Image: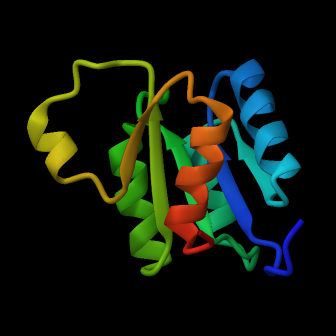
Amino acid sequence: MSDLPLKTILLVEDDEGYAYVVAKTLTGAGYTVTIAPDYRDALKVLESAEIVHLLMTDIRLPGVHGFALGRMARHRRPGLQILYATAFTDLPQHEIDTALGKILLKPVDPDLLIAEVRVALGDG
């Protein structure tokens, strides 16, 4: 483990099993992970005093699109870093072009996941 300060990731994922695997990978790399199963719980965290350094969200969530959640998150926390994840490869190009962060294809290789999180957070 490095001397970097602990950083918190808000993981928004409706697949409980996948959320567990991702959270375990990230905590193993030294990050704190808060899991929100839907956008409502994510917004509660973002509207609270809880520190969040990175939002990692599924793109296809029940109730709201992950890109919309990213915009809502940035409205509440302007400097927030964002990573998106999806199992779908049929995203419209205009959505990809206007995404507020990098889009990762699920399932994300654990080493790639950690590397992308470090880049997003400026940790490596």
Q: Quadrant of residue 103?
A: top left
Front residue (pair 39, 55) = 55
Using residue 51 as the reference point, say whether residue 89 is left or right of it: left
Give the vertical position of 46 relative to 61 (above or below). below
Front residue (pair 70, 108) = 108
Give the vertical position of 45 relative to 79 (above or below). above
Residue at the spot x=37%, y=50% of the render? 102
Front residue (pair 63, 13) = 13
Tell me the quarter of the image containing the N terminus. bottom right
Give the vertical position of 110 relative to 72 (above or below). above
Tell me the quarter of the image containing the C terminus. bottom right
Using residue 50 as the reference point, say whether residue 86 is left or right of it: left
Q: Quadrant of residue 50?
A: bottom right
Residue 114: x and y in percent read 65, 49
Residue 106: x and y in percent read 51, 24
Residue at the spot x=27%, y=52% of the render? 99
Residue 85: x and y in percent read 47, 35
Residue at the spot x=75%, y=23% of the render? 16
